Image (cartoon, rainbow, N blue to C red):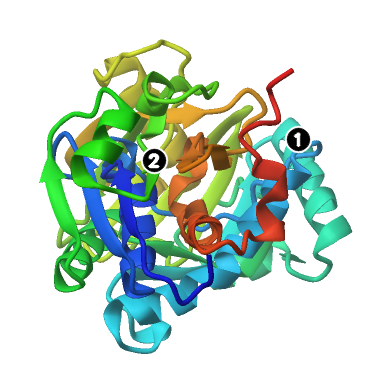
């Protein structure tokens, strides 16, 4: 088919991947049915909302680094299409820039590994700062932090505002949103008369199509600044704290703090132990957090593939996978939506070749 043809596409999933994909398809002139069991919940609702393309570049995970960088490049134009204003004026963006640092020597070595991997492929995107320079940039951070680097090209968003805006934009574009569970992709396709079905149901995608996706639990805190509290950092802070990852993401009302990670199967209960660890680690990075009000703790199930690279592509004629994004669903939503549009229009994106969902089939 040509890019000028209009098709009926059924999208399964109400998280950021499904909703961004539905928006992109409808914005391109396709008829879209968005099928989901309920209003937006799950890991997209729980998430911290970081566009951490470069500051999560672990050695051996170069495909994720490239996917993240590609998606980051596509996010600002997507926000302009979504809100109708220049991206820098977006009410969804909550901060620009990331600080990456460690607490002890082993943490600093981990940071150095990330820096080396990123610099090999994207030289100059990270800049090293001294403790004095870090203090000038973010005076509220603890002086114990070491090995700090800054990335000015990463952003953060309020994920819940993003989901709300996507929902409103989909309605304005005429997306038919149907609440209800899906148990059979072919029945859905016949029932709504869709030409293509996109499965973006997160960890539940494996129940609908043959993809290797597993659930990994993560917990995130939301802490509200009180009148007497110290001002929060302006940038996203990604820290290694005695081997554990900790992030603080700015919000207009305070901070999102995350995140734990457990291979516990289908477990959606937030725990006292996870909450305590997050609070202790966050206070090590930003001591002023002790005076913040505890607003929420929530847990979500992140959908991971065996190699942590998402699954984006056609699994059989007329059925497209868009799942397995792990902890990077918010970041990768832009490139995933564009990739699905490309598949639907017969113009697949070469940039997502590493995410071929058929790579695990013998």
| Residue behind mark 2 | 200
Note whether residue 288 is visible. no
| Residue behind mark 1 | 105
Q: Is residue 20 left or right of residue 117?
A: left
10 Å crowding of disc 2: few (<14), some (14-19), many (20+): many
- Element on which disc 2 rests: loop
Q: Residue at x 74, y 69 (%)?
A: 125
Q: Which of 268 and 211 is in front in this view?
A: 211
Residue 26 x %, y %: 31, 68
Q: Is residue 226 left or right of residue 248?
A: left
Residue 256 x %, y %: 33, 48
Find out whether the residues at labels 1 and 2 contact each other: C-beta distance under 8 Å.
Answer: no
Q: Which residue is drawn at 85% across and 50% down?
A: 116
Q: Which of 66 and 246 is in front in this view?
A: 66
Residue 48 x %, y %: 38, 48
Quarter where residue 278 is shown: top left
Quarter where residue 133 is shown: bottom right
Q: Nearer the viewer, residue 306 or 238?
A: 306
Closer mark to the observer between disc 1 and disc 2: 2
Question: Farthest residue in the right direction?
Answer: 120
């Amino acid at each position: 088919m040509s890019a000028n043809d209009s098709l009926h596409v059924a999208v399964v999933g109400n998280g950021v991947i499904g909703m961004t994909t539905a928006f992109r398809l409808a914005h391109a002139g396709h008829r879209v049915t968005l099928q989901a069991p309920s209003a937006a919940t799950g890991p997209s609702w729980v998430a911290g909302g970081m566009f951490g393309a470069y500051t999560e570049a672990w050695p051996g995970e170069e495909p994720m680094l490239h996917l993240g960088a590609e998606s980051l490049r596509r996010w600002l134009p997507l926000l302009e299409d979504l809100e109708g204003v220049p991206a820098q004026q977006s009410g969804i963006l909550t901060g620009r820039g990331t600080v990456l640092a460690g607490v002890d020597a082993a943490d600093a070595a981990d940071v150095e590994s990330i820096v080396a991997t990123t610099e090999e492929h994207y030289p100059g995107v990270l800049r090293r700062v001294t403790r004095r320079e870090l203090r000038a940039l973010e005076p509220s951070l603890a002086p114990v932090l070491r090995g700090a680097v800054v990335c000015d090209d990463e952003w953060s968003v309020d994920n819940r505002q993003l989901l709300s805006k996507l929902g409103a934009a989909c309605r304005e574009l005429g997306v038919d949103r149907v609440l209800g569970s899906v148990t059979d992709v072919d029945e859905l396709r016949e029932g709504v008369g869709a030409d293509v079905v996109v499965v973006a149901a997160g960890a539940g995608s494996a129940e609908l199509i043959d993809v290797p996706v597993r659930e990994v639990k993560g917990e995130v805190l939301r802490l509200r600044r009180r009148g007497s509290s110290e001002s929060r950092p302006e940038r996203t802070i990604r820290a290694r704290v005695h081997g554990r990852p900790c992030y603080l993401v700015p919000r207009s009302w305070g901070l999102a703090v995350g995140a734990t990670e457990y291979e516990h199967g289908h477990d959606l209960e937030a725990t006292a132990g996870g909450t305590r660890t997050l609070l202790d680690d966050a206070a090590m990075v930003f001591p002023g957090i002790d005076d913040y009000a505890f607003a929420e703790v929530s847990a979500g199930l992140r959908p991971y593939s065996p190699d942590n690279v998402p699954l984006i592509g056609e699994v059989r004629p007329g059925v497209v996978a868009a799942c397995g994004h792990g902890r990077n669903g918010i970041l990768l939503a832009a490139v995933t939506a564009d990739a699905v549009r490309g598949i639907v229009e017969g113009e697949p994106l070469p940039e997502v070749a590493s995410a071929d969902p058929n790579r695990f089939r013998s």
